[in-house]
Amino acid sequence: RDELPEGEEEEEEDLELSKAGFRGSTSSPPQKPSAPLEDPPGTPPLAPVLQLLRDQLQEKDALIRHLENDWERSRAQREREERLLVTAWYNMGLALQQHEGDTAARGGPGGARSFLAQQRLATAARRARAPHGRAASSS
């Protein structure tokens, strides 16, 4: 400190005082931290400012609670929708499987169970039809 010029020394004291929670200029005598802090003369009282800040904090807390509740409702709704989609896919797959099983049991055109059997049926059906513009062969 002894090496600092006078102006910088005062700035350093101001910095130390502001870090310690003191307000005002360096010309006023430093207050003890254990003594209750009072507003310096010429400044507005802190009570209305503190009340305003407390009110803002309460509003923000209420907003946070509202947003958290909204998020929780959205999450629950999304989970319900996902369960409904999974159930719908399961039911649709089950119905399709039962429909294919019923068709195969009747022995209809879709009754061929393997891919090759289906191809054989399609080829046989094409051969049974007459070619374009020609009469069906009686071979």
Image (cartoon, rainbow, N blue to C red):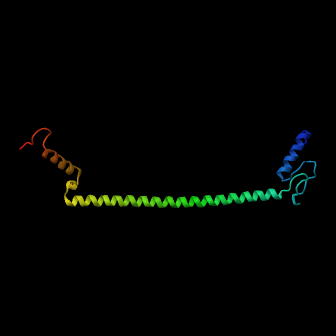
> Residue 29: percent from the left, percent from the top?
93, 52
Where is the N terminus found, in terms of image quarters? top right
The residue at the point 20 percent across, 56 percent down is: 108
Could you tell whether 9 is left or right of 60 in the image? Answer: right
**Image side of residue 135 versus residue 39, left or right:** left
Question: Which residue is nearer to you in this view: 77 or 22?
Answer: 77
State left or right for residue 95 relative to residue 127.
right
Quarter of the image where one finds residue 136: top left
Q: Is residue 135 above or below residue 67?
A: above
Residue 118 appears in the figure = yes
State the residue lying farthest toward the left.
139
**Residue appearing at x 67%, y 60% in the figure:** 62
Q: What count of labels does the image hold?
A: 0
> Quick check: 64 above or below 134?
below
- The residue under the point 13% across, 46% down is 128
Q: Which of these two is toward me, 135 or 74?
A: 135
Foreground residue among 30 and 73? 73
Where does residue 124 sit, x and y in percent of width and height? 15, 47
Residue 3 in view = no
- The structure residue drawn at horizontal position 89% and vertical position 42%, both measured from the top left corner, is 9
| Image quarter of residue 101 | bottom left
